Image (spheres, grey):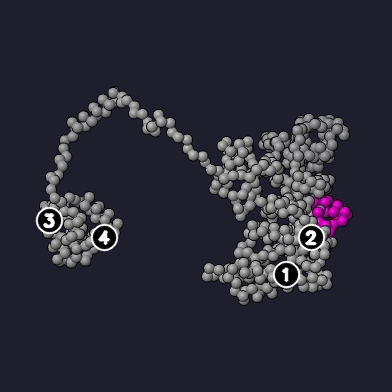
Amino acid sequence: MKPKRRSPIYSLNRKPDEGLSTEIALERFALIAPLRHPGLDRKHRRALCRQIAQKGWSHPLHGHKSLCERTVWNWYQAYEGSQLEGVRPKGRKDRGTLKAFDKDILDKAVALKEELPSRKVERCIEILSLRGDIKAGSVKRSTLQRHLQKLGMTGKKIKNRDEAVRRYCAEKPGDVWHSDEKHGPYIYLDGRYVKTKIFGIIDDCSRNCCGMEAFLDGSEPNLESMFKDGLLIWGCPSVFYCDNGKVYVSRQFTRICAELGISLLHTPIYSPESNGKQERFWGTLAGFIQEANNARYTSIAALNQALRAYVDLKYNRVVHSAHGRSPHSVYMEGLASTRTVPPESIETAFRHVALRKVAKDATFRFDGRVFEVDAALAGQQIELRYDPGNTSDIVVYLGNERVQRAKPFRPPAHLPRNKKDTGKPAVKAAVKSSRQFLNSLVEEKQRQKQKIMVPRESRERFSLANLLELLDLPEQRLTRQDRQNIQSVFDTFGPFDPDKSTRAIKKAAETKGKARHLSFYLRTLVESNLPSN
């Protein structure tokens, strides 16, 4: 017996929050990024659009979803017109409501798909029409397809098609930049040799090196630092082509490219030939790495100074076989057509993003510190954009609108205490019955006691000072642990008789000497005061 079908949980009327909306926009941007390649004509762009639609896309909330060619093309045109805002999802009031047919028709179509998952939507409509549930032509395939897709009742098997890699070259400088990372030379730091990492950028058309720097590690902030310097000096490319390294596929780097209008493209997996121009440049740089290893640099700054000089004099300004001219001269010739971005926009794009909810007192916590904002933001979710190198400089955004800069929170001085408030709780009056009850218990216990403890006679006792004096041992030589051990013996077995103790210690010192361990003399002291049988 088949289990009872549960109604799927799917909130169609829910408006995505800002974080989810940005995630969807970034996924759409990554999907259409190949269409923005400047080397594609309209025919190849349409063919590539069809291939992208056949593969579908990954929704951040609902997983894999199928696509049609028109949707991909609409996203491409929307991004060209409005950048990232063009591909951000737009909510609608009647989203998810059934207008073309009733819910029972959708339930019957779902039952048909559950009965045979491979059954096409057109076949479901034909069966519903034969049963008399719907009129012929009253339900469109695309409408039913959309609702079944939202319920997870559709799916397609995607077949990957291998395509031959064809040689290409950008039309003008600044269209396509290639980037990669490589193990650099060793430097001597803190008594050991440390291998460096080099990030590099090569322009596709001119072969000019637009960015090159060595770091102690290949982390994402280091890549962003090198990329930012390249943008400020050489302009902004249309396409940034790189491999699938962790730093290149990160959400932060993808957002930077989207904010600056740069199409971020990745090479196919296990195909380094796709980024052949950058790989060829590493072969040219091998000579520098060999010389730098023999130079035994002791600082990353000195290594980078030599690296920049080598790249500029031995590569950028040397005649390249691709053009018969130097890469620097070719790039400078087309510099006027290179897209430029204001430095302020670059600074904004390279800020990292974090979401926080403002507390009721108009403060929020970030990086272990407390910041304050305007009281109007209390209780709202805000977006923080900050420089990872200086987390005290935080710009606050509400949605896509810049609001203010966050200020470090400085609590005000405490208000003066009221003079009548002494800060001590008032003494409550004792309950007479409770006091009488407890006093009666004390008297009863006293009557039942059979033995009355009588304090010892007050007389002179053998002390620690007497012991040290007999052994000629200064008290300053005792460690803290020695004092604790001696005091524990005196508390447990004392008080000791002064006469017996003095005779026993003197006899032990004469027989065994005064250089024995303290435990020997303490044991002698205890044995001398034990009662004789």
Please state which amino acid type lies under the numbered disc 4: Gln
Residue named by callout 1? 312
The secondary structure type at the circle numbered 1 is helix
- For badge 1, the amino acid type reads Asp
Q: Which residue is mark 4?
A: 476
Picture residue at 84% right of the left edge, 36% below the top: 140
Q: Which secondary structure lies at badge 4? A: helix
Residue lying at 82% horizontally and 51% vertically, measured from the top left:
49
Tell me the amino acid under the disc marked 2: Gly
Q: Residues within 10 Å of mark 1 (few under 14, many from 20)?
A: some
Which corner quadrant of the image does residue 304 belong to? bottom right
Tell us which disc is closer to us: 1 or 2.
1
At 18% across and 62% down in the image, what residue appears? 471
Residue identifier under label 3: 500
Which contiguous range is marked in magenta?
36-52
Task: Please determine whether, in this image, residue 139 is positioned above or below residue 495.
Answer: above
**Residue 342, can we see it?**
yes
